[in-house]
Image (spheres, coloured by chain):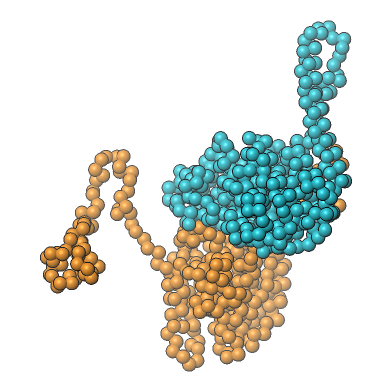
């Protein structure tokens, strides 16, 4: 294909391939100026390196396969695009099937996109915009009236062997602090298999890097006869995370009570049992009641969604006192000076 | 610290492969060697400045210390990006591991001069700086500052150890030896060594006396005013610098107690205020104290993240007024002026910066 440009002002042949003066082909136009020849794929790649073994070590640019990031989700290697440059807060979101994990993610995304996050936080880009939009497809197709019973499709991973991460960038104010969130969207089956078999704990190795974990529990289920099953499952999940996956005791764990609108935003008493169990495992846990998408007109959609993250992305700690050195007199009384006041 | 590559590298890569970890370990080993072999302190200073403040601001991709880190890593991993907008956090992590290795490699033995200087720089840079954002990065810094403290503590104990070996030899000399000439030669050597020991002991004793008399007098010797009559900002800089100048290097582990005791004489020394308000209490009488002498003076100018108060004092001295510096201070040092600190914290910062300045020239 010959490429070129036109010297006539206003002619867009270089972009559109159509001559302003309707010459066919455009190269017939007297104003057309060829610039370069784009070789065909066959012409581009020489079979043998021209100069022997030394140049064989250099792979021509055209020979390497060009892979575009799909924008749907990030694998652990993909996260380097953002995590190599600046700190990313990795948030593990776990819970049973239909607990509300994906709805939580969508609610967070939509609040960010609409500028409804508190404390001046604003949407500041996403490497997985398409992934959020794909997940929100059911919502987008809703045409008003009662909310559909299913707001998000069942999560399935493009690679079932590794976790998928969604990226959400937030900024506090126009020139404020930027926070990059890497949020897991794992199928409920992952949590179930972890509960059923400790052998699958290796899949969750990446959670050792988590800045926080959101354990999504179905708030509605906690007020029904399914309460005991939900409690037992959630406790086992905590035990697996702490004992088999090995998450640190200092990792903030938030029990995210979903579907709060269906329980009149009343915290189920069973949550105290879960918090006690977490404390017994040495975990730093709290609970947040949320309503990602509310069926109750009194409860706004997105209630509690950002609050669940605040402990994880809180600002840096204030300046503290200097680290006290261990006492070592070495036979000199001056070394004891000031010790009593520490 | 190279043993911590897997754990610390997770800051950058949530699930690194063993191959990646091996490559990074090898790259950082190269970096450690390069820092060890450097002919001057610039690499150490630049790398530590990048660690403390981050490489995303105030560092150029072609700066020697940045290029050194990138070259070391690229030697083992050619896919490592060159652009600071793409690799700033990874450079910071590599710097943390490398500098941690330089400090930790001596174990519990007295540290070499590189380790001591790195420890002092970290203390100076992190003094009034809030912990960095992010749980895992903050934990790295907690470990590094703890390691720095440990290194300096071991070094200061070694510096002040009383080991009268040569003195004992002199005292044990037997005047009735059969061969007097060789014995006298041996005695002469022992006497010389004993005098060195005695000088060292005298210096240690003098340090104690000087500090204790300075505390007792409760007067700034540079400003020639009682500490109780100084404004908190002026007192902070004066106390920090004067105590630092009285200390042997490395300073005593409890040297901060001297500064705090002195600051108790100062009115409102424990009242928290924003940094800009405390600095408004400073004037020309104290600014030169932290600007450093001759070779030291370059530190504040070139490495504001490590010597924020030194930079500020130079800036204030150049402009002549204690106003209009905040925006530039924030941009240069990465510190916010709205953070609340006590004047005594500022005094400690002045102390740490002055100690690092003195170590820079004494090591040179």
Q: Which chain is cyan?
A: B
The front one of A221 and A128 is A128
Q: Position of residue A120 (x, y in %)?
A: 58, 74
The front one of B68 and A44 is B68
Q: Position of residue A112 (x, y in %)?
A: 52, 76
Left or right of residue A238, residue A134 in this image: left
Of the 4 image quadrants, the one containing the N terminus of chain A is: bottom left
Left or right of residue B122, residue B185 in this image: right
Of the 4 image quadrants, the one containing the C terminus of chain A is: bottom right
- The residue sitting at 55% across, 37% down in the picture is B38
Q: Which chain is orange?
A: A
- The residue sitting at 45% across, 67% down in the picture is A127
- The residue sitting at 84% across, 54% down in the picture is B228
- The residue sitting at 78% across, 20% down in the picture is B192
The front one of B360 and A50 is B360
**Is residue B213 visible in the rendered structure shown here?**
yes
The front one of B111 and B272 is B272
Relative to A129, say whether A146 is above or below: below
Q: Residue furthest front?
A: B320
Relative to A224, say whether B59 is above or below: above
Q: Position of residue A94 (x, y in %)?
A: 57, 71
């Amino acid at each position: 294909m010959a490429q070129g440009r036109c010297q006539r002002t206003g002619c867009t042949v270089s972009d559109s391939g159509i001559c302003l003066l309707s010459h066919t082909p455009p190269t017939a136009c007297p104003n057309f100026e060829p610039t370069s020849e784009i070789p065909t794929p066959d012409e581009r790649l020489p079979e043998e390196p021209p100069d022997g073994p030394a140049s064989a070590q250099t792979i021509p640019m055209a020979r390497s396969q060009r892979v575009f990031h799909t924008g749907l989700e990030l694998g652990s290697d993909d996260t380097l695009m953002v995590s190599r440059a600046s700190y990313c807060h990795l948030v593990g979101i776990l819970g049973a099937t239909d607990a509300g994990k994906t709805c939580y993610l969508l609610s967070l995304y939509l609040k960010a996109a609409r500028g409804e996050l508190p404390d001046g936080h604003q949407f500041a880009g996403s490497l997985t915009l398409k992934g959020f939009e794909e997940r929100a497809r059911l919502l987008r197709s809703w045409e008003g009236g009662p909310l559909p019973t299913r707001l998000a499709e069942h999560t399935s991973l493009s690679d079932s062997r590794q976790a998928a991460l969604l990226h959400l960038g937030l900024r506090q104010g126009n020139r404020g602090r930027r926070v990059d969130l890497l949020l897991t969207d794992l199928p409920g089956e992952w949590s179930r298999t972890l509960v059923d078999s400790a052998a699958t704990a290796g899949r969750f190795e990446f959670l050792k890097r988590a800045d926080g974990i959101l354990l999504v529990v179905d708030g509605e289920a906690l007020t029904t006869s399914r309460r005991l099953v939900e409690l037992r499952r959630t406790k086992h999940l905590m035990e697996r995370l702490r004992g088999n996956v090995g998450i640190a005791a200092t990792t903030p764990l938030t029990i995210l009570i979903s579907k709060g609108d269906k329980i009149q935003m009343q915290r189920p008493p069973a949550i105290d049992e879960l918090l006690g169990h977490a404390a017994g495992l040495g975990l730093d846990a709290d609970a947040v009641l949320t309503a990602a998408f509310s069926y109750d007109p009194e409860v706004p959609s997105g209630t509690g969604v950002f609050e669940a993250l605040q402990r994880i992305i809180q600002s840096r700690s204030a300046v503290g006192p200097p680290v006290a050195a261990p006492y070592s007199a070495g036979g000199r009384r001056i070394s004891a000076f000031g010790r009593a006041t520490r | 610290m190279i043993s911590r590559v897997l754990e610390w590298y997770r800051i950058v890569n949530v699930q690194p492969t063993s191959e990646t970890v091996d490559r990074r370990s090898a790259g950082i080993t190269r970096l450690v060697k390069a820092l060890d072999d450097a002919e001057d302190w610039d690499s150490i200073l630049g790398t530590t400045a990048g660690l403390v403040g981050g490489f995303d601001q105030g560092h150029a991709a072609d700066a020697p210390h940045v290029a050194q880190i990138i070259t070391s890593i690229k030697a083992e991993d050619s896919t490592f990006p060159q652009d600071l907008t793409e690799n700033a956090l990874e450079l910071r992590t590599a710097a943390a591991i490398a500098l941690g290795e330089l400090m930790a490699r001596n174990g519990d033995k007295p540290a070499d001069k590189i380790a001591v200087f790195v420890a002092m720089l970290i203390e100076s840079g992190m003094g009034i700086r809030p912990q960095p954002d992010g749980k895992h990065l903050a934990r790295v810094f907690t470990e590094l500052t703890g390691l720095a403290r440990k290194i300096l503590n071991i070094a200061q104990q070694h510096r002040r150890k009383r080991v009268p070996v040569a003195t004992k030899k002199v005292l044990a000399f037997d005047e009735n030896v059969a061969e007097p000439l060789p014995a006298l030669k041996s005695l002469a050597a022992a006497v010389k060594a004993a005098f060195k020991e005695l000088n060292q002991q005298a210096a240690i004793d003098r340090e104690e006396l000087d500090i204790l008399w300075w505390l007792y007098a409760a007067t700034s010797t540079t400003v020639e005013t009682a500490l109780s009559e100084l404004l908190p900002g002026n007192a902070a800089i004066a106390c920090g610098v004067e105590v630092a100048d009285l200390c042997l290097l490395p300073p005593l582990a409890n040297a901060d107690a001297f500064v705090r005791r002195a600051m108790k004489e100062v009115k409102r020394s424990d009242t928290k205020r924003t940094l800009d308000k405390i600095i408004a209490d400073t004037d020309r009488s104290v600014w030169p104290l932290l600007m450093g002498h001759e070779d030291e003076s370059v530190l504040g100018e070139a490495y504001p993240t490590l010597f924020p108060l030194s930079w500020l004092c130079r800036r204030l001295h150049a402009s002549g007024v204690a106003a209009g510096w905040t925006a530039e201070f924030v941009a240069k040092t990465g510190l916010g002026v709205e953070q609340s600190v006590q004047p005594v914290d500022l005094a400690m910062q002045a102390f740490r910066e002055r100690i690092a300045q003195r170590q820079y020239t004494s090591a040179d």
